Amino acid sequence: MELKLNRPICFFDLETTGIDVARDRIVEIAIVKIYPNGNKESKTWLVNPTIPIPPHATAVHGISNEKVANEPTFKELASQVHNMIKDSDLAGFNSDRFDIPLLAEELLRAEVDFDMKNRVSVDVQTIFHKMEERTLSAAYKFYCGEILNNAHSAAADTEATYEILKAQLERYPELENDMKALSEFTTRKKFVDFAGFIALNAEGQEIFTFGKHKGALVEEILEKEPGYFGWIQNADFPLYTKKVLTGIKLRKLNTKQ
């Protein structure tokens, strides 16, 4: 079964220095772009993360400091990556919780504006976990009947994720072959930022999910306690969270004019 697309969708996978979205860096990125007419474009980059790759990370993906020493930094690659994904929906395996948030941090760090306002995301892992509860390698064997060679290679994992989604649509007729519907199916919670510090309540209003103002309306806190905005901007929060908070503050200011 091929995907029914109204716009391109980019399947992508990251290999990184670790799992901290705000602090860790990309060492490899692979993107497979699928067009509505079925054409496919793929690209893989090795990336110099500009920070040491811990041995435990190298043990997972096999990418050492020496291997990427002469590779471009993400800042040098950012425009190429953004140009490939800017007109597309996004998909991956655990991408909503890890790959998209970390990619957003890297792009914003490289001064490339990025958000999800005009696109949707499909997390293939969530479909898998809701239906079968397994890992990527098991998913590939279960849905595609093949062994996933070179697991934890970004290119192999990306291709496997694309093949798994097509097989999932074949297996589960109740899943609609539509990226917006799949995005809604794979969305776990209604967070405004990727890291989950700002969420939507039942009325669709932004609320804080942490700290002394947990559950409080963001707009009300920013008005009553303006110093809280400054504290978050200067603290070790993800760049995308700061971007979202700034947008809420500017929106509130504009409504007062």
Image: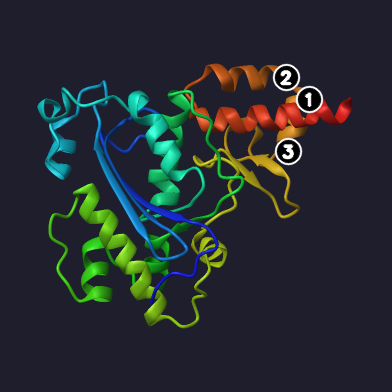
Residue 254 picture location, percent across and down: 82, 28
C-alpha gap between disc 3 and disc 2 = 13 Å
Looking at the rendered structure, the kind of residue marked 1 is Glu
* Residue position marked by numbered label 3 in the rendering: 217
Does residue 35 appear left or right of residue 218 in this picture? left
57 or 106: nearer the viewer: 106
Q: Residue at x 20, y 23 (%)?
A: 52
Of the numbered discs 3 and 2, the one sitting upstream in the chain is 3
Looking at the rendered structure, the kind of residue marked 3 is Leu
Looking at the rendered structure, the kind of residue marked 2 is Pro
* Residue position marked by numbered label 2 in the rendering: 226
* Residue position marked by numbered label 1 in the rendering: 223
Position of residue 59 relative to residue 42, above or below, is above
Position of residue 176 relative to residue 10, above or below, is below
Q: Residue at x 34, y 75 (%)?
A: 167
* Residue 15 in sight from this viewpoint: no
Of the numbered discs 3 and 1, the one sitting upstream in the chain is 3
Circle 3: element type: loop
Residue 80 picture location, percent across and down: 38, 34
Q: Residue at x 72, y 27 (%)?
A: 249
C-alpha gap between disc 1 and disc 2 = 6 Å
Q: Residue at x 44, y 37 (%)?
A: 82
Does residue 107 appear left or right of residue 6 in this picture? left
Residue 198 picture location, percent across and down: 60, 39
Position of residue 84 relative to residue 236, above or below, is below
